[in-house]
Amino acid sequence: MKTHKDLNAWKESMNLAREAYRITKAFPNSEMYGLTSQIRRAAVSIPSNISEGAARNQKRDFIRFIQFSLGSLAELETQLILASDFGYLDSGNLSQFINKSNLIRAQLTGLIKALKKSLNN
């Protein structure tokens, strides 16, 4: 790995964050400081934590920051489900988000496993 930008998990989570910003533009103004803000913050946290962890140059730190990304991903999913429940997000868009988040979760989990394995070698 050259930089965090070479990681598929970072690339996919950047796309997810862009998509989160796009869909929240249509949310009601009354949610600007509620779900809109929370969704955007959680979405941005995913690739941000990947990049911060990669920059630490310590595998244990990197693992910890990937775990933070996993937490933000779970938070984002919860917020998107709520947005769907409130009628701000249709079920098709929710399904796309869930599918993308499942892919990112698998990539992050795989990265953690690889890093842990290299720590033991």
Image (cartoon, rainbow, N blue to C red):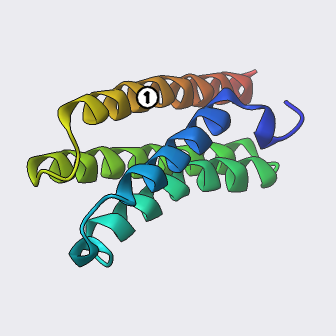
Choose between 49 and 85: the one closer to the eye. 85
Give the residue at x 45% y 64%.
41
Q: Position of residue 95 (x, y in %)?
A: 27, 28
The mark tally for this picture is 1
Q: Is residue 59 left or right of residue 25?
A: right
Location of mark 1 (residue): 100
Tell me the SS state at disc 1.
helix
Q: Residue furthest right?
A: 2
* Relative to 48, residue 91 above or below: above
Question: Which three-letter amino acid code belongs to the residue tagged 1?
Answer: Lys
Choose between 59 and 80: the one closer to the eye. 80
Give the residue at x 54% y 57%.
44
Q: Position of residue 6 (x, y in %)?
A: 80, 32
Picture quadrant of residue 91: top left
* Relative to 82, residue 119 above or below: above
Q: Is residue 113 left or right of residue 88?
A: right
Q: Quadrant of the N terminus?
A: top right
Picture quadrant of residue 108: top right
Give the residue at x 25% y 72%.
31
For disc 1, the neighbor class at 10 Å (few under 14, some 14 to 19, many from 20) is some
Q: Position of residue 72 (x, y in %)?
A: 42, 52
Q: Quadrant of the C terminus?
A: top right
Choose between 8 and 29: the one closer to the eye. 29
Q: Position of residue 83 (x, y in %)?
A: 20, 53
Q: Is residue 87 left or right of residue 112?
A: left
